[in-house]
Image: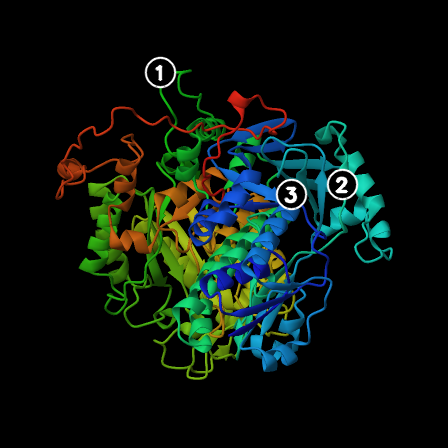
């Protein structure tokens, strides 16, 4: 078999070495336009998983890399004059030049034909002459461009600026520096990679970069491989306090914008993409080199395992694409966190450091407690205002989810909300026994607030015939029966969501009302654009329903302004095409929703809570922007909403949401930190660890846990037991206390014997990188395999 590899970077060389090792009879040729000793970039960081794979695939390469590694466990966060350290992470890094030399030597030893200083032939020529073409030719891949119609690339170029540098200062840990200057926020990602050098990445948002004066030197033409020396020296001056007299070292360094590369497919006939040609992930979460080498291992393995190239390439793409997409989701969250770092710089340094460390959602509250319990305890104490353990007989603070929160006139005992769930069990809008059982069980399940769902303000406002309403005396009496039972059995506040389904309504005799005459989809009826008289009627319906909700004994009220219902339809530019004073810019689109909110606020008691649920994005082109969401949130808060229940989507049928764990939380984070209005985070939040992480980082004030509480109605109480919390924020009903502990199962009562004479020493939580030349033999870091940092 004849294999052509375009690009002699780490991914291409590692693939060539592995493939030749597995199939010595293959003819493998690598084209690399640079000389063997040319390299751009500085240090490369590896995770435990990647190193395990390298160790199994080629122990020789692993041994050579390990001999060069700088190893440490700590992360330092410099913010507002404080340096906070979190340990237990585990890092292994080495210079990119060293890595290339190791891989080049391995390829030479195996007989791979590597052609340095040689441009590769065109992709089509290689595809015709070879059995397989591996495109490892980088972010600006010529191979990907040649077959763009097939690969379907999507290049997401971000607005921020960064510059990749080195320094002769050897940092002792992975170091984040956040400097607030008159021009904006300047941030640095730095880490050591050998005895004499560290990587030093400077990053800024576009506006700060412009104000700092970098645009002029960045605009100058540079020769190939040249560096923007003026900007380098300016960065050196700005960050002198962190460099301790050391210099910044450029290497083809210039201001860049990060581009996230995605492709619809990675395979075209006998051509396959690898590494940056196929995908990129922001440098703040990991190394592109790491991902490329993982690709190389997978591709070499699948080629060895399958009898034909097409089957092997399908298996490679299937195996790697899911892994890469997961990494890209985490990297995107990290990238966006740093792009919007100004939202968080006002936080207490402890909370800021925790927020930074958990930005990708891969590192969590529990994970940090395992890595460095002292660090997490310090954050807990700083955020809760509770003294650290040992300073008071009261002991440590409760987990974040079990701290009280004042919501309007209500004091919630904890931060967990049972969100409104559509049950579709009502008859003629009258809730029945199932609604009673559902709400009573959730109220006894320990959450701080329970909401009943999707209750219509009029008969023709119901989304389905099974939806409840609150527009008749019979319905009001039925709801009163339910709240009386709930309040008799529990002190958990119970609320009601009021809505008008708008164009999503299916119960009216004529066409449904909507902001504009746009059907939900091609199968739905075309609604009627509302008149001023229609709007007045809807305002009256909401006011009457709110009064009924008060009389029915509800402690909180939520108005549904999201998910494509009537008031959501006014807010979104995709569903509001009106040309009167209620259509146009976001201020105009807000008029009618604000009118409804103000009218309800006027009749809803101040001693209770008033919430509004919104869809903060439409997940569709031309829909709500982040700026729109912030303006809407600020206006709703100003009109009397005590908190915003921040959901997304379901506004248009052609939406394309990016689902994933806690995928809607960034919008609650955006609104809370941009406006100061309290928020409830919703959407795929299912573990108490995620709840604690969201709350402690300051991304939301409350968390709604929906599907997990359908699975386990006692989810909140079980979360308390799992964390060893038995305080007043998680009360068990007396009749259920006997079931508080998890029942024993097979072998859970087994006590294992001691089988070792000596207990292994626990690795140190805090470990700094000490250059080999500077460290006496007894104190040199051991070559232990690190745990992944992200």
Q: Identify which residue is drawn at 73% across, 62% down.
A: 117
Reply above or below: 229 against 398.
below
Which image quadrant for residue 763? top left
Question: 404 or 510, which is in the foreground?
Answer: 404
* 417 sits to left or right of 695: left
> Which label lies toward us, 1 or 2?
2
Q: CA distance from mark 1 to mark 2?
A: 52 Å
Task: Look at the numbered disc 2 and give the secondary structure of its residue.
Answer: strand
Q: Is residue 644 or residue 344 the one in the foreground?
A: 344
Q: Are marks 1 and 2 in contact (CB under 8 Å)?
A: no
According to the picture, the residue beneath numbered tag 3 turns out to be 342
Question: What residue did someone put label 2 on?
Answer: 249
Q: Earlier in the sequence, mark 1 or mark 3?
A: 3
Q: Considering only order in the chain, which callout, 2 or 1, is on the residue closer to the N terminus?
A: 2
Left or right, 481 with respect to 162, comes to: left
Residue 71 place in picture, x, y as percent: 54, 35
> How far is mark 2 from mark 3, CA to CA?
28 Å
Q: Is residue 173 above or below residue 221?
A: above
Which residue position holds label 1? 393
What is the number of the mark on residue 537?
A: none
In percent of the image, x 20 and y 28: which residue is there? 754
User: At numbered mark 3, what does the secondary structure look like: helix, strand or loop?
Assistant: helix
Does residue 467 appear left or right of residue 371 in this picture?
left
- The percent coordinates of residue 170 (x first, y second) are 66, 32
Q: Earlier in the sequence, mark 2 or mark 3?
A: 2
Q: CA distance from mark 1 to mark 3?
A: 38 Å
Residue 304, percent across and down? 42, 67
């Amino acid at each position: 078999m004849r294999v052509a590899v375009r690009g002699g970077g780490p991914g291409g060389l590692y693939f060539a070495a592995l493939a030749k090792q597995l199939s010595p009879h293959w003819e493998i040729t690598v084209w690399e336009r640079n000389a063997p000793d040319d390299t751009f970039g500085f240090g490369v960081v590896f995770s435990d998983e990647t190193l395990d794979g390298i160790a199994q695939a080629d122990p020789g390469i692993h041994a050579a890399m390990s001999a060069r590694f700088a190893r440490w466990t700590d992360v330092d966060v410099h913010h507002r004059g404080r340096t906070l350290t979190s340990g237990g992470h585990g890092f292994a890094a080495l210079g990119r030049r060293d890595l290339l030399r190791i891989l080049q030597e391995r390829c030479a030893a195996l007989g791979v034909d590597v052609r340095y200083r040689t441009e590769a032939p065109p992709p089509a020529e290689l595809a015709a002459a070879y059995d397989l073409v591996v495109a490892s030719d980088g972010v600006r891949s010529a191979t990907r461009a040649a077959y763009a119609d097939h690969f379907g690339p999507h290049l997401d170029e971000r607005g921020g600026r960064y510059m990749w540098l080195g320094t002769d200062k050897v940092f002792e840990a992975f170091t984040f520096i956040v400097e607030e200057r008159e021009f904006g926020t300047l941030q640095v990602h730095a880490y050591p990679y050998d005895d004499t050098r560290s990587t030093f990445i400077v990053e800024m948002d576009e506006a700060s970069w412009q104000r700092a004066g970098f645009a002029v030197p960045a605009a100058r033409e540079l020769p190939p491989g040249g560096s923007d020396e003026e900007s380098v020296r300016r960065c050196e001056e700005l960050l002198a306090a962190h460099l301790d007299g050391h210099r910044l070292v450029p290497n083809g360094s210039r201001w860049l914008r990060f581009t996230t590369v995605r492709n619809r497919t990675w395979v075209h006939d006998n051509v396959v993409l690898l590494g940056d040609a196929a995908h990129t992930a922001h440098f703040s979460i990991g190394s592109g080199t790491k991902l490329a080498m993982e690709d190389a291992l997978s591709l070499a393995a699948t080629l060895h395992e399958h009898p034909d190239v097409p089957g092997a390439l399908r298996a490679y793409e299937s195996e790697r694409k899911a892994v890469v997409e997961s990494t890209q989701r985490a990297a995107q969250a990290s990238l966006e966190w740093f792009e919007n770092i100004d939202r968080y710089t006002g936080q207490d340094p402890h909370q800021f450091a925790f927020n930074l460390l958990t930005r990708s959602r891969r590192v969590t509250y529990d994970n940090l407690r395992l890595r460095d319990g002292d660090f997490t305890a310090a954050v807990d104490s700083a955020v809760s205002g509770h003294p650290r353990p040992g300073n008071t007989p009261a002991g440590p603070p409760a987990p974040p989810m079990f701290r009280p929160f004042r919501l309007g006139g209500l004091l919630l005992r904890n931060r967990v909300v049972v969100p409104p769930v559509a049950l579709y069990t009502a008859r003629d809008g009258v809730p029945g026994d199932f609604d009673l059982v559902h709400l009573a069980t959730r109220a006894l399940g320990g959450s701080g607030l329970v909401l009943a769902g999707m209750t219509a303000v009029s008969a023709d406002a119901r989304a389905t015939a099974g939806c409840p309403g609150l527009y008749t005396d019979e319905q009001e009496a039925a709801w009163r029966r339910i709240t009386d039972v709930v309040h008799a059995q529990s002190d958990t506040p119970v609320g009601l969501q009021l809505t008008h389904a708008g164009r999503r309504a299916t119960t009216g005799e004529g066409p449904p009302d909507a902001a504009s005459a746009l059907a939900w989809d091609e199968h739905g009826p075309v609604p009627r654009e509302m008149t001023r008289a229609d709007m007045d009627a809807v305002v009256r319906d909401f006011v009457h329903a709110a009064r009924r909700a008060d009389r029915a004994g509800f402690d909180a009220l939520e108005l549904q302004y999201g998910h494509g219902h009537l008031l959501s339809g006014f807010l979104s530019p995709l569903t509001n095409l009106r040309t009167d004073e209620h259509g146009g810019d976001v201020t105009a689109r807000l008029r009618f929703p604000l009118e409804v909110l103000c009218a309800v606020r006027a009749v809803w008691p101040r001693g209770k809570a008033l919430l509004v649920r919104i869809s903060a994005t439409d997940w569709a082109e031309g829909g709500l922007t982040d700026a729109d969401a912030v303006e809407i949130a600020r206006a709703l808060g100003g009109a009397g909403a005590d908190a915003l229940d921040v959901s997304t989507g379901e506004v248009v049928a052609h939406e394309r949401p990016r689902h994933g764990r806690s995928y809607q939380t960034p919008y609650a984070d955006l609104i809370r930190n941009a406006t100061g209005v309290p928020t409830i985070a919703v959407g795929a939040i299912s573990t108490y660890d995620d709840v604690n992480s969201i709350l402690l980082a300051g991304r939301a004030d409350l968390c709604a846990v929906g599907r997990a509480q359908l699975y386990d109605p006692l989810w909140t109480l079980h979360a308390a037991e799992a964390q060893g919390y038995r305080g007043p924020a998680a009360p068990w009903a007396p009749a259920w206390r006997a079931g508080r502990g998890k029942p024993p199962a097979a072998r859970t009562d087994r006590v294992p014997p001691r089988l070792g004479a000596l207990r292994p020493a626990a690795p140190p939580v805090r470990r700094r990188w000490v250059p080999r030349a500077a460290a006496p033999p007894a104190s040199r870091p051991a070559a232990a395999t690190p745990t992944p940092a992200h």
